[in-house]
Amino acid sequence: MDDGQVAWVTGAGSGFGRAIAMRLVAEGYKVAATSRSQTDLESLVAEPVAKGAIRAFPGDVTDRERMADLAIAIESQVGPIDLVLLSAGAYIPFALEQFSAEKTMETMRLNVGGVVNVLEAVIPRFLQRRRGHIAVVSSLAQYRGLCRTTAYGASKAALLAMCETLRLQGRGKGIKVQIIVPGYIRTRMTEKAPFPLPHIMAAEDAADEAVKGLKTDRFEIMIPKHFVRKFKLARLLPAPIYFWYASRSPDFGGVRPK
């Protein structure tokens, strides 16, 4: 990573996105930080670690026009965007008995819609310059249906399919596409989890691993590798075996029978 490159980080106000923004500064990036919370962004910009290299560009990623305007503002005020790292997302849990179309669509609007709104704003720029780097933060839930992630898992599976396609399409056009697959990280989102979170990591430690992965050409940046691989390998299990195992495994949100 070269000094002076520009990274646009969404979901930068808190948690994993905030930790990544600060870690990118240490790598020499100038960071355009986006979050819905102006207060969170002001706090981020004021961090000593920010070193004046983080600028706040508040906005809601579900607002398509606002994301288009922010792309223009960032490039005029900070410089051409080299990396877009899409971390904004939400986990809205509900049980089968409270199945909610509204909560499902709210999840999709943020976790998928928020990604595509930003991509629509930056991909034409990357194509014109024949260079650009896209990194999307996904989840363990992208690989198979977990016991308690009905809407969230659907949104992350959609991101995986999208990023695989973008990776294929970006080849030969100067666009590198990666998907960041963290295990469990201590954030506001994981505080809502209704099941145990094994191997949970501090956001700063996960951000270190994510930024290391950005320097490689790997498609999937798995954090930590040994834990994420368990979920990835679950894709190879026949459906009956997977459903039996997942319903009993705490790692997959199930409860072992007593």
Image (cartoon, rainbow, N blue to C red):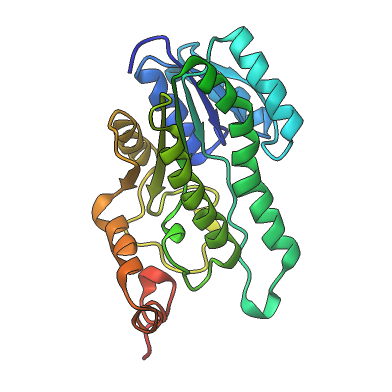
Name the quadrant containing residue 91.
bottom right
Name the quadrant containing residue 210.
top left
Residue sitting at 67 percent across and 14 percent down? 73
Outermost residue, left direction?
226
Say if 131 sits above or below 114 in the image.
above
Say if 234 sits above or below 239 in the image.
above
The number of discs equals 0
| Position in image of residue 175 (x %, y %) | 43, 27
| Position in image of residue 257 (x %, y %) | 38, 89
| Position in image of residue 1 (x %, y %) | 33, 18
Foreground pick, 28 / 126: 126
Residue sitting at 56 percent across and 10 percent down? 78
Foreground pick, 146 / 253: 146
Foreground pick, 90 / 137: 137
Q: Left or right: where does residue 170 sit relative to residue 69?
A: left
Q: Left or right: where does residue 133 sit relative to residue 111?
A: left
Residue sitting at 36 percent across and 76 percent down? 249
Figure quadrant of the C terminus: bottom left
Task: Examine the rendering and report whether any part of residue 68 can be seen.
Answer: yes
